Image (spheres, coloured by chain):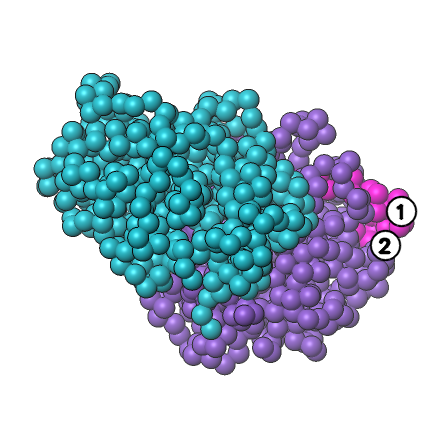
Chain colours: A purple, B cyan
Amino acid sequence: MGWNRVAIIGAGMTRFGELFDRSMEQMTAEAFTKALADVDKGIDPDRIEALWFGNCMGSLSGNEIPSGAVLANALGLVGKPASRIENGCPTGSDTFRHACMGVASGIYDVVVAVGAEKMCEKPNRKSLLESGRIGNPTFAYSQTATTLFAPQIHRHMEEFGTTKEQMAMVAVKNRYNGSLNPNAHYKTHITVEDVLNSPEVCSPFNLLDCCPQTDGSACVIICKAEIAHEFTDEPIYVAGLGCATDPLYYHEKELLTGFACTGGAAGQAYKMAGITADEIDVAEVHDCFSGVEIMNYEDLGFCNKGMGGQLVQNGETSLQGRIPVNPSGGLMSKGHPIGASGIAQVLELYNQLRERTGERQVKIHNGYGLQHNVGGYYIAVSVVSILTRTL
Amino acid sequence: MGWNRVAIIGAGMTRFGELFDRSMEQMTAEAFTKALADVDKGIDPDRIEALWFGNCMGSLSGNEIPSGAVLANALGLVGKPASRIENGCPTGSDTFRHACMGVASGIYDVVVAVGAEKMCEKPNRKSLLESGRIGNPTFAYSQTATTLFAPQIHRHMEEFGTTKEQMAMVAVKNRYNGSLNPNAHYKTHITVEDVLNSPEVCSPFNLLDCCPQTDGSACVIICKAEIAHEFTDEPIYVAGLGCATDPLYYHEKELLTGFACTGGAAGQAYKMAGITADEIDVAEVHDCFSGVEIMNYEDLGFCNKGMGGQLVQNGETSLQGRIPVNPSGGLMSKGHPIGASGIAQVLELYNQLRERTGERQVKIHNGYGLQHNVGGYYIAVSVVSILTRTL
């Protein structure tokens, strides 16, 4: 037997931003009710058989342990199966992957994947990444997300001549796209000069090279492909799912100018979908820092290794380019509430492939979209999903 | 399409106990290598395509964030997909459920479910349950696991005349069974008088009514049923999987003399397996406290509501009884390292159904075994799995 095919039939999200006034439960309930309302032909919530909840930081950020059962209560789905997935920065996309497997398994017909994170409230104890250290001297002290990603970018600049200007172009592009997205955290335009003149956080990243700390929630409703037309005439199908891991420490990593796990996850997803990178019309990728998006282009196969800087400089990843990347604004402009980020990427692709994103709509040729996250403690895990208009 | 059937082909665990000298990675590596060695016809680790890791307390208990990628590294499975599942006390069984869905989906052929918890080291910050409070005044202060479970047991005593002596009989039975299990945390015999004379922790629980704080890891290797005979002539198949949630707070719970989510999860699993409770030969259930096992008998359908105390008093759940429960020693004697507990229950059933557990072997008639956990924050989630000798 192969796998039972899976379709997306509705998607919803909160505005991403500083949502100090809203609890985890309130944010997820809003994303869920918007996803229900988004189902074209309507859906009785009783049809939903199981729930997956993506939350990364969990109890690290406060007094709440946002478990599956808490979410089942928040969404009015008490009684149904509910599980929490945690997988570092790809937590949201891995939650989507697990919801898809639940349907693909044949055990559930209609399920929900919801992710949420509250990032803006100050933790009442040690920070996420400080808590993540395992004792390796490289990482045990003064570790932040920038210091984790910076060495790879420097190596990329050294080996391939990638420039800070090219990185700034990623930031400018994504901020422009975000200005067209009402749910984005940052909506103002910036220039390459703005990025280059913003304060340095950790070389080579200036402040405007970094994604913000963001609160938010996103939700998608999925079902087995055979029944999708009960709910909408335009379901979007899941074509491929991939997840891969890397060695934890630099001295064990073979690729230092990118992330091998991204290539691994993408390879699995392309193989499952039976397509190559050339057939992707639009992608939402993990741009936690500008330079990371450039490396993702290469790791995902959108260009050859070392050519990522040129790709953005030539405008090929802009809304009107050959392979538009992060039309939603990406993590850098839309924001990065970890457990929600991957699911919000899926939501954007769902709407892009249905050609209903207004001013930021890209051209759809082959009908394929790709979603990608990479990170986790030690940048050692990546998840990639490929969506398609046709079964 | 139905679901692709799943088989267990190997299982391994560490000794459960106080393992101060071993890291999470060391414990999981031992459980994994023992599971590999347990595969009758051998298995090349390269055949393993994906990994699920169960860990509940995670970063709450120290400086480590035990993510999927960390485990892929610990087990020598770098590159493969790896995800962490958290679902409160049923974390281990939900990890098994997700690994089964991964195979059932048709996406993976051979996968690993591994769980681990380090419970004995003192947390360097607030305790698990204190961190779990959400602000409800009932639970915000002085909450420990005993205070969460005690009210239900008192109500059960009040409504059905269940006695502290009957609860003590559960403790005595499970400690006896554990004395026959080399991997159990507690191996000494106790008497009903010992239990009744042990210090009161939280009425109606005395010290010997409570499971210990335990370190340990357990692992099972599963594959799609069609290829199971490549690995063993005696695979054990998965017949049913269930997971259900409850309201969080007492004032919303309808059942106060048991846990509705256990009945919900069991109902799903029985339906999927196409059997009733009468066909179960042996069960491993969530005996975090003696009285909880008594309520589980009822919620799982082994006897009518209110008759659980009689069931243990009549010896029907002893090794030689009609429906032996917790032949491994259960959480009370074997121990309860949360992320590992459910997987260790599956391991026990795997060996019981293969009739190779020596002195604690029960009689197998119909070839079905049932595994059960209940709990999580606010006792609002349960997971049940049913295993079978025949496809």
Q: Tell whether B324 sits left or right of A223.
A: left
| Circle 2: residue type | Gly
Q: Which type of secondary structure does the marked residue at label 2 adopt? A: loop
Write down the chain letter for disc 2. Answer: A
Q: Is residue A66 magenta?
A: no
Indicate the position of residue A139 as horizontal and vertical percent values. 69, 31
Indicate the position of residue B201 as horizontal and vertical percent values. 26, 23
Q: Which residues are magenta?
A: A145-167
Q: Main secondary structure of the magenta part?
A: helix
* For the residues bearing labels 2 and 1, Cβ distance under 8 angstroms: yes
Q: Nearer the viewer, residue A68 or A177?
A: A68
Residue B25, picture quadrant: top right
Q: Which type of secondary structure does the marked residue at label 1 adopt? A: helix
**Label 1: few (<14), some (14–19) or many (≥20) C-alpha neighbours in 10 Å:** few
Of the 4 image quadrants, the one containing the C terminus of chain A is bottom right
Of the 4 image quadrants, the one containing the N terminus of chain A is bottom right
Q: Tell whether B177 sits left or right of A344.
A: left
Indicate the position of residue A172 as horizontal and vertical percent values. 74, 56
Indicate the position of residue A210 as horizontal and vertical percent values. 69, 46
Residue A128, picture quadrant: top right
| Circle 1: residue type | Glu
**Residue labelled with disc 1:** A159
- The answer to whether residue A329 of the structure is visible from this angle is no
Q: Is residue A339 above or below residue B34?
A: below
Q: Nearer the viewer, residue A250 or B181?
A: B181
> What residue sits 50% from the left and 33% below the top?
B14
**Residue labelled with disc 2:** A306
> What residue sits 30% from the left and 50% below the top?
B281
Q: Is residue B218 above or below residue B225?
A: above
Mark 2 to mark 1 CA distance (whole Å): 8 Å
Write down the chain letter for disc 1. Answer: A
